[in-house]
Amino acid sequence: MRVLLVGVGGVGEAIAVVGKDRPWLEKLVLCDYNTGRAEEVRAKLGLPGHMPVEFVDAADQEQVLFLARKHDVDLIHNAVDPVYNEAIFDAAYEAGCHYMDMAMTLSRPHPSDPYHVCGVKLGDYQFERSEAWERRGLLALVGMGVEPGLSDVFAKYAQKHLFDEIDEIGVRDGANLEIKGYEFAPTFSIWTTIEECLNPPVIWDEERGWCTTEPFSEPEVFDFPEGIGPVECVNVEHEEVLLIPRWIKCRRVTFKYGLGEKFINVLKTIKMLGLDNRFPIDVKGVKVAPRDVVAACLPDPARLGDQMVGKTCAGTWVKGRKDGKPREVYLYQVADNEVCMRKYGVQAVVWQTAVNPVIAWELLDAGVWKGCGVLGPEAFDPDPFMERMLSYDFPWGLQERQPQDA
């Protein structure tokens, strides 16, 4: 397989680390606007000959298209902030190659009733073009990271093997990570964090369909496994809620994230000051997006690994019935930062995200996963994916929980 990797930040670097020695990966083109960063990653990996470096402006569809054709790639993998998704997605279509991302095209809140009614939903731009991709025999596999991605694979696995009926699928993400020396330092892109945490969260309800609620609503304490323990989680906008109901029959889908009171208060302050704005404003004759300023003031998550301690957990909590009896399970993956840094030289959050697309690349390359149009991870058989997780040093767990109505 020949892949054009657009974005060599924290997750992009981790993707290169995971994919480096895979015999089926013929070429991985490291593309970034900061070619020094891409060259640094390439040198860190031992200057592999099958990983050339290219400059790219991810907002420039023609540049992405040119590079895809220059390197005759099979797939363009989008590893940049989702504000660039439309350009990269459209470039893949024009190039006649497959596409994959880890976050779908952006939403826009409903103009008059944002906390009850959906406006433009995550991924709408992509799903509206699914038939065109299908006619050309091309696949756009959207939302193939850890959340979304692995969490969706877990949901499909639960449907296939663990339940006869599903009441609710709730993705729950929590951690006990600490970053020494920083009062506020997100472990993932602050640009994406602001987008998903401050937009109206979406909930799927079988009777009402997709509807919205207020940011940070419906707090609950979820007990995470492997020593992380109880963490308060709140509603956050996320792709799983838009993906899972398209392929899995269930009555309700939610996504809740363990942010913590301090983190939530910082985000609320960013919102209050208008610093969440992703559109450029005039500052003494200079056009700048406030959100980009916030990002520039914070440390690069890719370089925080040495200061981080603790674990992060991504997982899918499923409630329903099996053989006429109530059942609840939590399928999960836990990444320990100390282990990730020692083994792979990247921090836990980006490593946990990066493994999943590389497994998906392998499945596509082998023809085990196949399809065309715009599809989510739920559209594929989960078994081959989960069977490969151990060979990627990526173990998963299944925790039976006491059903509340048992």
Image (spheres, grey):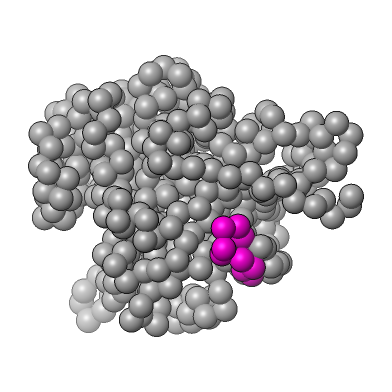
- The relative height of residue 24 versus residue 212 in the rendered view (above or below) is above
x and y, in percent, of residue 27 in the image: 20, 30
x and y, in percent, of residue 341 in the image: 31, 57
Closer to the camera, 319 or 190?
Answer: 319
| Residue beneath the point at 79% across and 31% down | 164
Residue 326: which quarter of the image? top right
In-image side of 247 versus 56 (left or right): right
In-image side of 374 versus 292 (left or right): right
Give the quarter of the figure containing the N terminus: top left
Based on the picture, tell me whether residue 116 belongs to the magenta stretch.
Answer: no
- The relative height of residue 59 versus residue 109 in the rendered view (above or below) is above
Give the residues drawn in magenta, as a range.
224-237
| Residue beneath the point at 69% across and 29% down | 161
- The relative height of residue 323 versus residue 84 in the rendered view (above or below) is above
x and y, in percent, of residue 248 in the image: 68, 34
| Residue beneath the point at 32% across and 71% down | 307
**How many numbered dots are placed on residues in this image?**
0
Based on the picture, tell me whether residue 226 belongs to the magenta stretch.
Answer: yes
x and y, in percent, of residue 160 in the image: 68, 28
- The relative height of residue 214 versus residue 23 in the rendered view (above or below) is below
* Residue 80 seen in this snapshot: no
| Residue beneath the point at 29% across and 67% down | 306
* Residue 269 seen in this snapshot: yes
